[in-house]
Image (spheres, rainbow, N blue to C red):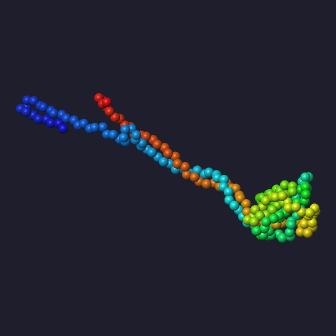
Amino acid sequence: MARASAINNSSTVVYGGGTWMPPVSRGGGGAAIAGLRLAGEYEQVEEERSRYVEGWRVVRAVCLDDTGTPHPASRPDPDERVPREFDGEIYRCMAGTWMQTSIGWREEGVDRFEDGQTLVCEKGEALRHAPGGRLYCATEEPRRNCNERSLLRRYGPGIKLVYYRYEETYTETVERRSERVSAQSMTIMLDGGVGSY
């Protein structure tokens, strides 16, 4: 505030003043973060998963000798459908041959083996079914000589319809959120001044 007054028209006196303001502190001594941003991004990731698949499937088997010549696999009974609770052999091979089994689907009365599964049994093994739908190779049960030829004459080669349960591995694409944190400081703090310690 300034004041001026005139006394006797002979002199002029002027008084001047100013104001002082203390410095303003922002954010506690230089630790201020301005412009903090959290960004969520989505990315697609492939995950390998597994699941159990079960249902009625068709099975056919062929026996192969050392030269690769196919021979029909023998069935121990004439029934096409294998009961779900059955525990035993469903295909056998003659001595000296190994078994290649194809597992497919029956759609509208037609048996399809494209994109099916293959199960290979070593020489001396039979294809077995266990309760719950498990198909596996195991050592053949002891039988008399020429048993497989007798079974083929009696029942012929053929398809078996089995209840089958297996674990399938597949790849699934899932979307995941990932977070990215970025911070920018745009604050400038000046403390002190002329004559300040």
Q: Quadrant of the C terminus?
A: top left
Instruction: Return the x and y of residue 76 as percentages of the image width and height.
Output: 86, 66
- Residue 171: quadrant of the picture: bottom right
Q: Quadrant of the N terminus?
A: top left
| Residue displayed at 89% across by 54% down | 68
Instruction: Return the x and y of residue 55 as percentages of the image width and height.
Output: 73, 66
Instruction: Return the x and y of residue 77 as percentages of the image width and height.
Output: 86, 69
| Residue displayed at 6% across by 32% down | 8
Foreground residue, 16 or 9?
Answer: 16
Task: Let me know if residue 114 appears in the view.
Answer: no
Q: Is residue 176 left or right of residue 122?
A: left
Q: Furthest residue to the left?
A: 8
- Residue 100: quadrant of the picture: bottom right
Foreground residue, 30 or 77?
Answer: 77
Rendered position, 142 above or below 188: below
Rendered position, 24 above or below 68: above
Foreground residue, 9 or 50?
Answer: 50
| Residue displayed at 57% across by 52% down | 176
Q: Is residue 29 left or right of residue 47?
A: left
Foreground residue, 108 or 12?
Answer: 108
Q: Is residue 32 left or right of residue 150?
A: left
- Residue 160: quadrant of the picture: bottom right
Task: Let me know if residue 123 appears in the view.
Answer: yes
Instruction: Return the x and y of residue 168 as percentages of the image width and height.
Output: 71, 58
Q: How many numbered badges does the structure rendering display?
A: 0
